[in-house]
Image (cartoon, rainbow, N blue to C red):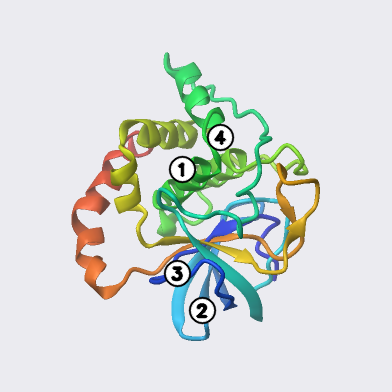
Amino acid sequence: MALGLAATLGLVATSFADTVHTLDTLTYNFQVSGGGGGSSARLDHTIKTEIYCVDFANEIFVPHQNYSAYETALVSGSNLSNTRLGHNTSWHTVAVSDGDLNDATDQSIINNANALGRYQMAAFLVSQYNFAAQGNASNNGIQEAIWMILDPSSAPAFPAIGNPSEALESAATWFNSTSAPLRDSFLTDFRIVSDSTMTTCHGSSAALCGGFQEQLTETPEPSSLLLLGTGLTGLGVFFRRKRLV
């Protein structure tokens, strides 16, 4: 079963920039409307994780074995050369229009962000999913917002499955109101999982082509589970406030 036509980010406990890993997709278990969502997977046949869709230009199949993948950290100074969008400098303009006075500011934060900032905002939004609700309005809006944030100008159009304005605002607010060290701490266990066979398609400033969708996942090391379950989770709840009203 195809996991929409969307890319996602991946999370694992350790990372080596040019090490090729094996990705097996297992069960499509988090479904939003119109494609996207997430599935369970394993890295290197041993590390169980969840992967989530972040772009709509490529397919990934569930179940499927032996995808060849790189993993890339989402912290300051990360080398994004093995990611689909690490070299991309031309993005579709994101519009935020929920009627708040800060709409223009939110738009500017997202549209002025580089590739790492956009991946970080997408990862933050993945942390805001209500998994039990599956394809409710809020989750659909989050998926739409992720596709918009990680939308290179060379990409095909993606479907409108929800209202992304609240999610876009929360991502921009989180990114703008936290320092780089705090963002790094929140995303310490997140990884981008990218197809190792991708190639340059339109020059060094464009997205890479070919391969499966990128995935977003999180597999905390045992020592970090307590931290993620206390202070960092609390920060995520704070930025979820508008969605729960």
- Mark 2 — residue? 42
Earlier-in-chain disc, 1 versus 2: 2
Looking at the image, do the residues carrying marks 2 and 3 touch, with CB atoms under 8 Å apart?
A: no
Residue wearing tag 1: 121
Q: Are marks 1 and 2 in contact (CB under 8 Å)?
A: no
Q: What element carries label 2?
A: strand
In the image, what residue occupies the spot 36% across and 36% down? 174
Asked which quadrant contains residue 193, the reply is: bottom right
| Label 4, label 2: how far apart the Cα atoms are | 32 Å
Can residue 236 be seen here? The reply is yes
- In the displayed structure, does residue 181 sit left or right of residue 124? left
In three-dimensional space, the C-alpha distance between marks 2 and 3, rounded to whole angstroms, equals 15 Å
| Label 4: how many Cα within 10 Å (few below 14, some 14–19, many 20+) | some
Residue type pointed to by label 3:
Ser
Residue drawn at 31 percent across, 72 percent down? 221
Q: Estimate the x, y position of residue 124 in percent, counting from the top left.
A: 41, 47
Which residue has dot 3 on it?
Answer: 15
Q: For this rendering, which residue is in front, 226 or 80?
A: 80
Which quarter of the figure has residue 189? bottom left
Type of the residue with mark 1:
Met
Residue type at the position of mark 2: Arg
Residue 130, numbered circle = none
